[in-house]
Amino acid sequence: MEKYINPLTDFGFKRIFANPKYPEITKIFLNAFLDLESPIVDLELLTNEGDGENLDSRGVIFDILCRDSNNREFVVELQRARQKYFVDRGLFYVCRRLSSQPKRGTIGEDRYKLTPIYWLGIINFNAFEDERYIRKINLKDENCQETDKNINFIYVELKKFKNRNPKSLIEQIIFFLKNEGDFSFETANLEFNKILNIAQFHNLSSKEIAIYDLDLNRKLAEIDAIETAREIGIEKGIEQGIEIGEERGEKRKQLEIAKNLLDILDVETISLKTGLTISEIKSLKD
């Protein structure tokens, strides 16, 4: 039996890092990744569903949505499977949260006063080209001077993390996530020990175990579906390659026949006999 629950399952991630019974763990988690000038002291976990902008808009569901005592908002999204436009998705969600801040009916300069939003995207695939596993993005001008503190993005690419002996809090959290709950190191980090205590499998109730098993099986089914699709894609690619090769071989035969007929037949007749275009046949004369 595993010692810790898998934090890359929906149940595991939210139970450990977005558990309303243990808001201190959420605070430890966010402070480790965001490295704020003014660390989070107190926070409130909000409902994880954002409202649509109108009746036709779909609501958006976040893995973690919370607000601290300074009115800063924090959004966390864990994405296991590759998503082509995940970075665009993060921008979309943050803009939606920002657009909901101005209060209707408010008059004066304060109408458009915004409070900062921090987006933390943890992804189990590579989204950027270089080897950095942590990337921080905000608004800057052409001289890389920060122009606005309200929009902040942090991306963590788990697959790029190579440290096999993590020491710092953030390294230990990333290692724990990347290795899906496997952590066998002796650690003196008291804050990470608090995370491990919440993550212990034997702390689950029988009802939670049933939910966790369903979630884990769904995750394994997703992995199997992706691998199956990849295998089918490879097989299909091989088949297409064979077909293309056969087509090219047939084309070469047609061109060779046409070349041999040039001295005895006119171009139009050769085209009729071989199926080649007149321009293709004329090119053989050059």
Image (cartoon, rainbow, N blue to C red):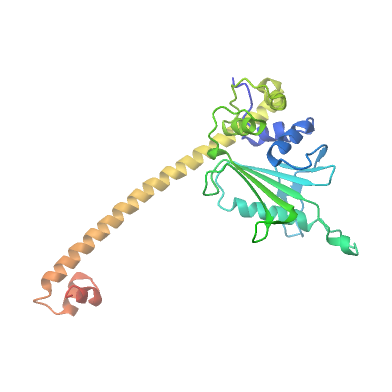
- Residue 30 is situated, as x and y percent measured from the top left of the image, at 72, 38
Query: Which quadrant is the C terminus positioned in?
Result: bottom left
- Residue 223 is situated, as x and y percent measured from the top left of the image, at 52, 38
- Residue 188 is situated, as x and y percent measured from the top left of the image, at 67, 21
- Residue at 20% over, 77% down: 282
Question: Within the image, what quadrant is residue 159 found in?
Answer: top right
* Above/below status of 154 relative to 277: above
- Residue 163 is situated, as x and y percent measured from the top left of the image, at 55, 32
- Residue at 62% over, 21% down: 3
Can residue 104 be seen?
A: no
In front: 25, or 70? 70
* Above/below status of 227 relative to 186: below
- Residue at 39% over, 46% down: 234
* Left or right for 160, reference 7: left
Can residue 239 be seen?
A: yes
Question: Within the image, what quadrant is residue 257 found in?
Answer: bottom left
For this orientation, the residue located farthest to the left is 264
